[in-house]
Each structure stands twice: as C-alpha cells, then as structure tokens.
Image: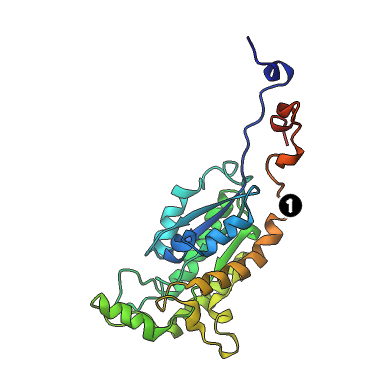
Amino acid sequence: MVPLYRSMMSKPKFVVWPQVVLFGDSITQFSFQVNGWGAEIANKLARKCDVVNRGLSGYNSRWAKMILPRLIDCQNSAADSNKIAAVTVFFGANDSSLEDINPQQHVPLQEYSENMKEITSLLTSAGVSADRVIFITPPPLHEPAWEKECILKGSPLNRHNSVAGQYAQACVQAAGQCGADVLDLWTLMQKDGQDYSVYLSDGLHLSDKGNQFLAQHLWGLLESRVAALPFILPYWGDIDTKSPESSLLCDQ
C-alpha cells in the first residue's frame, strides 16, 4: 500500500545545505577545535549553512593551488557554484618561513602573490565569483614564543614577524587585484601597538582569544554574504502536528 503522503504529493526535493568553505593551513585545520574560530562561525550558521573545514596543516599556497581542483570541481562551473556562499583563503604563515632555515615550506613572496590570485581564478572557474572569496592574511608572529617551539624541534627560529608582514601586505594587494575581500589579521592584531601575543598560543597559532578575534572580524565580512540564506526546514513550533508531512515534505 502506498503511504498517504506519497499519494498526496510528488517526491520531495532533496534538501541541499549551502556551504561556507574554509580553505587554509593549520590555523584553519585547527579552527574546529574547542573555542575555534571555524566552530564559532559554524554555530552562527547552524540550520542555514554548512561550514566545511578544508584546512591542511603545514601547507603553503603552492601546494594549495595544486590541491584545490581536488576539493572543488574547477572544471564544472555548475557543480558547486550555487551551494557555495563563501570561501575563505588563509595561507601565508608557512609561505613566509625563512628560505635558508625552512626551505620545505617557504614560497617566495612574488610566487605567493601569484598563487593567491590563481586560487581565486580556480574558484571563479568553479563558479565561485571573486565577491564570495575572502582572503585572510597570516597573523603576526611572536618571535620569542615561536623560537622556543623551534628549539624544542631542534631548529633555530624559522620565521620573522617582519617577513610575515610582507606576506600579509602581498595578500591584501592580491585580494584587491582579484576583487576579493580581505581580513588583514597581521595589521589588526597589532593595531595601536597592542600586545598581540595574547592572540597566539605558541607564537604562531591562535589562542582562544585569537580565535575569538578572528571569528568576530570574519563574521563582519561573512554576514552580508549569508544574510539572505533561509532557515532550513521549518521551526518545530511551525510544524502542522496533524499533518506533519505537509510541513516537512514541501519544497522550501
């Protein structure tokens, strides 16, 4: 016997959640940890959007450019474009490693800039327009704390804050050239000479306060891009209890 709701209506449409994709290195990969910035964004977008973590610890922009077509179909502009509301692109902390000490992760400044622009082009080819892309610059580096981490691993200090600043500036410039938005963490965290070390857990990665700082400022850029997204599936109090299928199986 065919269930009553099947006889009353056509097969309901599959529910597709829009996505915000977080693409970056370890600072993105760790963003879903307790008090992480990605988790905070995901909480704000519950029932409206999936926040997808595509953070790859240790990666630089050179490797990111290569791997992006395996994460988003850059050959089929119709595949993901309608469901991707925004993409954050957060590289530079590894690219800015000192070449003579950490050549494995280092990417020259000019190449880094070109890679960031090419990542935007790849996203555009997948139907994700530049106005849905948000670059995030590397945060400042607290050299005394990071040097301790390096020494524990048998290495001298392999990054400098001034060099991270050069990559942050290149990121801002690349975003402007691409028509993408940008969150300049390096500048914001040091604004007015504040003690930016409180935003970092080990001199490089974010502390709880740093995660909160990033989530707050990123939300300011994301909110306009997701404001029009509807609440997915009815609020429980709006479901017709006498005929729930009329509420739950109708197309939104």
Provide the residue designation for mark 1: 228
Q: Quarter holding the N terminus?
A: top right
Locate residue 151 relative to residue 63 in the image: left or right: left
Please identify the residue farthest to the bottom as the structure is shown: 193
In the image, is residue 185 above or below residue 220?
Answer: below
In the image, is residue 196 above or below residue 181?
Answer: below
Dot 1 alpha-carbon crowd within 10 angstroms: few under 14, some 14 to 19, many 20 or more? few
Q: Position of residue 141 (x, y in %)?
A: 44, 80
Q: How many marks?
A: 1
Q: Give the image's coloring scheme.
A: rainbow
Residue at 62% x, 69% y is 216
Res. 100 visible in picture: no
Locate residue 247 relative to residue 111 in the image: left or right: right
Residue at 41% x, 79% y is 203
Q: Quarter holding the C terminus?
A: top right
Q: For residue 162, what is the image quadrant?
A: bottom left
Tell me the kind of residue under disc 1: Ala
Residue at 51% x, 83% y is 196
Secondary element under disc 1, as helix, strand or loop, is loop
Q: Position of residue 9 (x, y in %)?
A: 72, 21
Res. 168 visible in picture: yes
Q: 93 or 173: which is nearer to us?
A: 93
In the image, is residue 238 above or below residue 86?
Answer: above
Q: For residue 147, what is the image quadrant?
A: bottom left
Please identify the residue farthest to the left as the structure is shown: 154
Residue at 62% x, 49% y is 49
Q: Position of residue 31 (x, y in %)?
A: 48, 62
Q: Position of residue 4 (x, y in %)?
A: 70, 16
Locate residue 66 relative to residue 3 in the image: left or right: left
Please identify the residue farthest to the top as the structure is shown: 1
